Image (cartoon, rainbow, N blue to C red):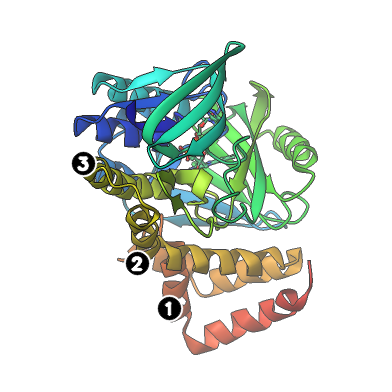
């Protein structure tokens, strides 16, 4: 009987496993992949808060960013920069590998190449049924953490409300002609309702990707062709990988003997689809709640719901603001996006950003409020007038 069974060896599962093992609890992580981070589709950008708060993953940093260039549909650009490093680019394979090795060093057991098919809870514990190399495996624990990411085959939503809004992402490794920092492309012909990116990683290489609600593969091929045609990238260096990104959290992320963490719970920034920092932030709360529950042998829905309350107090407002901003943005046509760029340039948002004290890579709702304050009533009126026809358009 394990104290905790964790499904998924992504950042959140590995982090929780290591921290619980440090408290002396017996932990098993079950992962369907053969190797850590092997098939992960992720750019790996995290704000400096993430590395500073968790003090993990510096070994996986392949590049740093203090600026990003945003491209309007017409190709006009706006560079936003800060005096110091704002974000780090992690190699996700190295990151996941490092976190798992760290957990193993704390005594965590891993069962790789094993796909969990079912989880049953009872008054005495949880039973996890899995398939490993064609064999049936049954594991028992006092509680389970579903850290299985988005779109797992597990019935994640059945107890806690269905996974709601989501978007598909696509990404490929590419040869970069030169490192011009992070580039973000907007426009309905590039990535309708969302954006595309080109992010330099190690010398001469980068990641090109985008997010869209539909025809993701087609948009990705066109994006890669346009980057090649403009000479920004050379060859594509690997297959295009795809991944789903939840844009809304589950209504309930806890139950008797069960917690949902990370993408499985929908703890992702709806503005950018970034989930590593929010997932780890919630994982830290999960560790605290699980440690108390294991120590007192008390796993009732009520005890476990402390996790729900605590992470929502911290992040739910930000997630809701982000989701509203995303909803509005998706209703803009290219002309309106162009006019927003014009407004940003006219009001010298780039200069303001250089000196804005409260900048946080992960607090987009707060950033939007700060921009609104900076623009003042007249600037906000002008932005609202630009956007309002788009907001009324159904999608
Ligand atoms: C194209 C793209 C780009 C992204 N870029 C960024 C970025 O730059 N920055 C950022 O912060 N976030 C980014 N994300 C999101 C980020 O990848 C996720 O938020 C993060 O990986 C979530 O971590 P997790 O531990 O919750 O789940 P995951 O990393 O998804 O890990 C879940 C693990 O569970 C395993 N698993 C699933 N089902 C089962 C099962 N039934 N049995 C056993 N094992 C199972 C999976 O194999 C996987 O290893 C991006 C996502 C996409 C799609």
Which residue lies at the image location 75% right of the left edge and 68% below the top edge?
335
Nearer to us: label 2 or label 3: 3
Q: Label 2: which residue? A: 356
For marks 1 and 2 on the same chain, the one whose residue lies earlier in the sequence: 2
Secondary element type, mark 1: helix
For marks 2 and 3 on the same chain, the one whose residue lies earlier in the sequence: 3
Percent coordinates x, y for residue 149 in the rendering: 53, 39
Answer few, some or many: residues within 10 Å of disc 1's Cα (few below 14, many 20 plus, some between 14 and 19).
some
| Image-based side of 282 in relation to 271, left or right | left
| 156 in relation to 365, above or below | above
The quarter of the picture where the C terminus appears is bottom right
Q: Label 1: which residue? A: 374
Residues at marks 1 and 2 touching, judged by CB atoms closer than 8 Å: yes
Residue 85 appearing in the image: no
Q: Quadrant of residue 62?
A: top left
Q: Label 3: which residue? A: 295
Percent coordinates x, y for residue 207 in the rendering: 57, 33
- Measure how far apart labels 1 and 2 are at the Cα level: 10 Å
Under 8 Å from ligand 1: the CB of mark 3? no
Secondary element type, mark 3: helix
Residues at marks 2 and 3 touching, judged by CB atoms closer than 8 Å: no
Which residue lies at the image location 58% right of the left edge and 41% below the top edge?
150
| Image-based side of 226 in relation to 3, left or right | right
Nearer to us: label 3 or label 1: 3
Q: Quadrant of residue 240?
A: top right
Answer few, some or many: residues within 10 Å of disc 3's Cα (few below 14, many 20 plus, some between 14 and 19).
few
Which residue lies at the image location 29% right of the left edge and 24% below the top edge?
102
Which residue lies at the image location 44% right of the left edge and 50% below the top edge?
67
Percent coordinates x, y for residue 281 in the rendering: 35, 49
For marks 3 and 1 on the same chain, the one whose residue lies earlier in the sequence: 3
The quarter of the picture where the N terminus appears is top left
């Amino acid at each position: 009987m394990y104290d905790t069974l964790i499904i998924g060896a992504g950042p959140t599962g590995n982090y929780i496993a290591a921290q619980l093992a440090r408290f002396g609890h017996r932990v098993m992580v079950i992962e369907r992949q053969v190797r850590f981070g092997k098939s992960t589709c992720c750019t790996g950008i995290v704000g400096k808060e993430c590395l500073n708060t968790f003090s993990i993953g510096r070994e996986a940093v392949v590049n740093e960013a203090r600026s990003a260039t945003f491209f309007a549909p017409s190709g006009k650009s706006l560079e936003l920069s800060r005096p110091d490093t704002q974000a780090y680019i992690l190699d996700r394979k190295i990151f996941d590998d490092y976190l798992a090795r760290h957990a193993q060093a704390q005594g965590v057991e891993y069962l790789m190449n094993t796909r969990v098919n079912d989880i049953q809870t009872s008054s005495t514990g949880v039973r996890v049924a899995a398939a490993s190399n064609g064999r049936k495996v049954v594991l028992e624990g006092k509680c389970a953490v579903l850290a299985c990411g988005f779109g797992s085959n597990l019935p994640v939503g059945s107890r806690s409300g269905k996974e709601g809004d989501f978007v598909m992402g696509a990404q490929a490794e590419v040869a970069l002609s030169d490192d011009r920092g992070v580039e973000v492309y907007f426009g309905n012909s590039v990535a309708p309702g969302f954006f595309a990116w080109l992010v330099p990683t190690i010398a001469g290489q980068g990641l090109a990707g985008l997010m869209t609600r539909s025809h993701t593969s087609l948009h990705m091929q066109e994006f890669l062709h346009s980057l090649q045609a403009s000479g920004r990238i050379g060859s594509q260096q690997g297959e295009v990988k795809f991944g789903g990104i939840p844009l809304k959290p589950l209504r309930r992320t806890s139950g008797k003997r069960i917690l949902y963490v990370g993408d499985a719970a929908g703890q992702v920034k709806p503005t950018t689809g970034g989930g590593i920092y929010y997932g780890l932030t919630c994982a830290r709360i999960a560790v605290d709640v699980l440690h108390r529950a294991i120590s007192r042998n008390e796993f009732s829905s009520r005890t476990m719901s402390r996790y729900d309350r605590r992470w929502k107090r911290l992040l739910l407002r930000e997630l809701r603001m982000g989701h509203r901003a995303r909803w509005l943005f998706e209703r803009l046509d290219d002309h309106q996006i162009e006019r927003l760029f014009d407004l940003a340039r006219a009001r010298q948002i780039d200069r303001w950003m250089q000196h804005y004290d409260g900048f946080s890579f992960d607090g987009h709702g707060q950033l939007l409020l700060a921009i609104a304050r900076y623009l003042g009533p007249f600037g906000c009126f002008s932005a609202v007038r630009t956007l309002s026809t788009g907001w009324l358009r159904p999608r």
